[in-house]
Image (cartoon, helix red, strand yellow):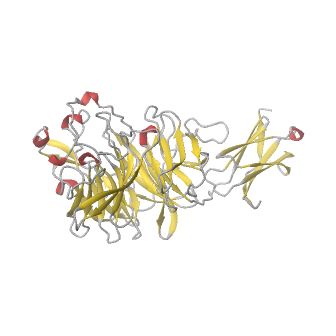
Amino acid sequence: MIHTKPRWSVPAIGAAAILTVVLATPSGAGSGHALPVRAVPAGAASPTSGLPPVPKVNVLRNRPGTAPGMFFTTPQNPNDLAVPHGPTIVDGKGRPVWFRPIPAGEIATDLRVQTYQGRKVITWWQGEHVNVGAGRGVGYIADENYRVIATVKGSSGPADLHEFRLTSRGTALLTLYPQVQRDLTAVGGPKDGTVFDGVVEEIDIATGRLLWRWSSLDHVPISETDLPYAARPDGAPYDYFHINSIDEDAEGDLLVSGRFVSTVFKIDRQTGKIEWRLGGRRSSFPLGIGVRFSWQHDAVWAGKDTIKLFDNGTLFLWDGYESRVAWIKVNPGRKTTRLVKQVTHPEHLSTIQEGNAQGLPNGNTAVSWGPTGRISEFSKGGKLLFDAALDKNWSTYRIFRSPWRAKPESAPIAVAQGGTVHAVWNGATGVARWRLYAGTAQNAMEPIAETAWNGLDTAIALPAAATSATYVKVEALDAQGKPLGSSNAAPRTGR
């Protein structure tokens, strides 16, 4: 059904009614070049792999026609910040492939495959979450061996969590949330109030040099906001704009999403001026049937003059509309807009924050439904092909699906406990099977069993004939049976 959304009638609300989550322990500052990686505390390590428990992705539907590749997630549990968080790759069956635990009190967002210096890399943002839905941290770039080869921050401080987009020029487009003094009387605030600016920066990754900067306060008046001043958390700066995505067209002009103005802006790169607005109080075009959106995320180009966005349609202030992914055709010359298509979840999910929609090479669309903890993939025609749910209280801001081949620098690990051997190789993507060796001495082991790879920690039952073995090791095999790597010999424990 096509949405026809009215303008919002905002109820009075006190700041005490706002649920906020404050994460402590700020991230270390990054620069535009490689930095040492912070040590990761042991945390609640599992007795097998030495890694903390990995949040589960429970697959509910997996039909033919899905795109190839793995899912790139950044699970968060705001109800338990002490449990390990970190960027996580899972396969199409929800099995973890790679997990990077990060320091307690930090979160990660925006894990995906991008291209840097002509090769595929994975990137993510990592740092502290502040109580207005922004972040203070660093963008990370890692190679196919999971080595961090560069980190990126803003020109004058930490990068925000919403966008870390690489360009073909060896640069990164970042969002930032600097605090600025402004007269807020137009929205019911003080004359000497503090507001968050919505900033885009382009940073040269190799040098850390600032190449381009755009400020919402220079171009979008505070009075354009849809967010009441009273809705800000007590003592927090007023977040009138809430920048949450950046995209770039073939000419280098930028598409910027301001969530709290319910508007997508096209920005002229040369001048920084707004070429046009889509949505909000000052839309440059009339909005066609079903086009109106609100509180959106992830506005990107999906072909010439077509914008794809995640239309939340709701906020923490009230229960809102069913969330959707919308494709909107914009004709600036004729000043027209048209809803091309939309997809919604069969369970009518309403997503008060976060969310994204990635266009896949086969025409499908991968969707994160934000704090609902659901991730989906739809066919080009809108059929739900894949659906999964993270464990209770877990969610992922964005989801991406991409092919990815990687081989860690570290060797596999074997851990033998009683009659079970655990084979672990964190991040290895080409493993199809594990071969188990056992013996009474480290240099006298024979192959005794094989089993299919079954996730980051694959359990192998020790055959009854090998119960006298005192040492074991595992060898990773590809689909053709070629060895990819083997562990050191490990003593059996708990016999």
Residue 104 shows in this picture: no
Residue 470 lies left or right of residue 322; in this view the side is right
Residue 365 lies left or right of residue 320; in this view the side is right
In this orientation, which residue lies closer to the viewer: 323 or 475? 323
Q: Residue at x 22, y 68 (%)?
A: 333
Say which quadrant the C terminus sits in.
top right
Q: Residue at x 51, y 54 (%)?
A: 379
Residue 15 position, x and y percent, is: 24, 31
In this orientation, which residue lies closer to the viewer: 98 or 31? 98
Among the 4 quarters of the image, the one containing residue 349: top left
Residue 202 lies left or right of residue 81; in this view the side is left
Among the 4 quarters of the image, the one containing residue 78: top left
Residue 164 position, x and y percent, is: 39, 56
Residue 280 position, x and y percent, is: 22, 50
Residue 45 lies left or right of residue 14; in this view the side is right
Residue 331 shows in this picture: yes
In this orientation, which residue lies closer to the viewer: 52 or 240? 240
Q: How many marks?
A: 0
Please say if 194 is above or below 481: above
Residue 381 position, x and y percent, is: 48, 55
Say which quadrant the N terminus sits in.
top left
Please say if 22 is above or below 1: above
In this orientation, which residue lies closer to the viewer: 470 or 394? 394
Please say if 120 is above or below 217: below
